[in-house]
Image (cartoon, grey):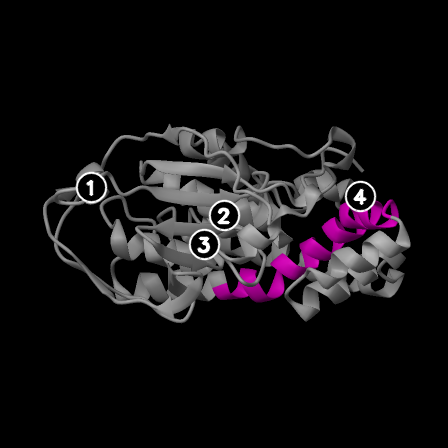
Amino acid sequence: MRPPLTEPKLALQPAPLIRGWALTLILSCVYRAHGGKVLLSRLSFLPSQMASSELLKRPNGPTVTLKYYHAEPVANSLKSMIPLIEKGLPYQSVYIDLHKFEQHSDWFVAINPEGQVPVLEHDGIIITHTTVINEYLEDIFPAIPLRPRDPVGAARMRYWNKFIDEHVMNHVSMHGWHRMIGIIARNIESGEFDRLLERIPLPDQRRKWRTARSGFSPADLANATEKILYAVDKVERQLARTEWIAGDHYTLADINFYSHCGMMVERMFPELEIGKRCPRLVAWRQKLTARPAVARALAAEDRTAPGLRTWTGHAR
């Protein structure tokens, strides 16, 4: 079994104040790791008037840290990294090198049986899937809100998150897989490639690796591009009505669309002339990129070879 990665130093952030009681029901994506087994966890009650630095301390024990397992700052890894920084939460960064297939290693699959990043660990609780992670952070650390506190605003934000998760992410991802993962897969000898596939826990991911190796069809790529155009046009129309995607306040919906499409769509698809087609989207992207938390997240560790940075559009 491969030994765990050496854990980097804590990235300490200013501690916001948490007011009121926070009650979080840990659902199916939230687990407690115990003795190599994955068990359903408990309800967590957090007392009022507690600063985040105090929240991360046990009453008579060591500081409880947030640990974030992630890859390069793009797509899903970026999507939950930005909220951590926006909220000023101290967290331990653990880089998972996807190009070395560390996400499928025994030690990491013991943390997340699906073998995917990112993963948030909080006081022994393992949370997977970025939309779930981000909602969890809102429930536990509400002092700097990225989710509207009124039901209507929260519903609007969740509508957009659902749209992005289901109708944007996978289509941008297909182009990323075609351009980057395909190169990696084709450079692996056939026997070794088959052995690597056996270590991938999710059947859908195994199929994607096989497809990336042979190449996605022109028809599938064209369909994905069409869906991306629909999405950017939809966001452009929304930004004609409101300052941010889900309304007049910056929310998790903005972070979601930025991480999966908005930050790199112009670089990935220069032929679409997004600057001319969607000027409001470009202005929104520039405003979001200028946020200190976003700039810090974008400057996070990235071990991707420069020639393979096709997902962000820095290489083609």
Looking at the image, residue 288 lies above or below residue 182: above
**Given the image, on which type of amino acid does mark 2 rest?**
Lys
- Give the residue drawn at x 49%, y 45%: 69
Q: Earlier in the sequence, mark 2 or mark 3?
A: 2
In this view, the residue in front, 93 or 313, is: 93
**Given the image, on which type of amino acid does mark 3 rest?**
Ala
Label 2: state its secondary structure: helix
Local packing at callout 2 (Cα closer than 10 Å; few below 14, some 14-19, many 20+) is many
Return the residue at label 2.
79
**Given the image, on which type of amino acid does mark 1 rest?**
Lys
**Given the image, on which type of amino acid does mark 4 rest?**
Glu
> Could you tell me residue 84's position as x and y percent?
38, 42
What's the CA distance linking mark 2 and mark 1?
26 Å
12 to the left or right of 300: left
> Could you tell me residue 245's position as x and y percent?
46, 53
Magenta region: which residues?
162-188
Q: Which mark is residue 253?
A: 3
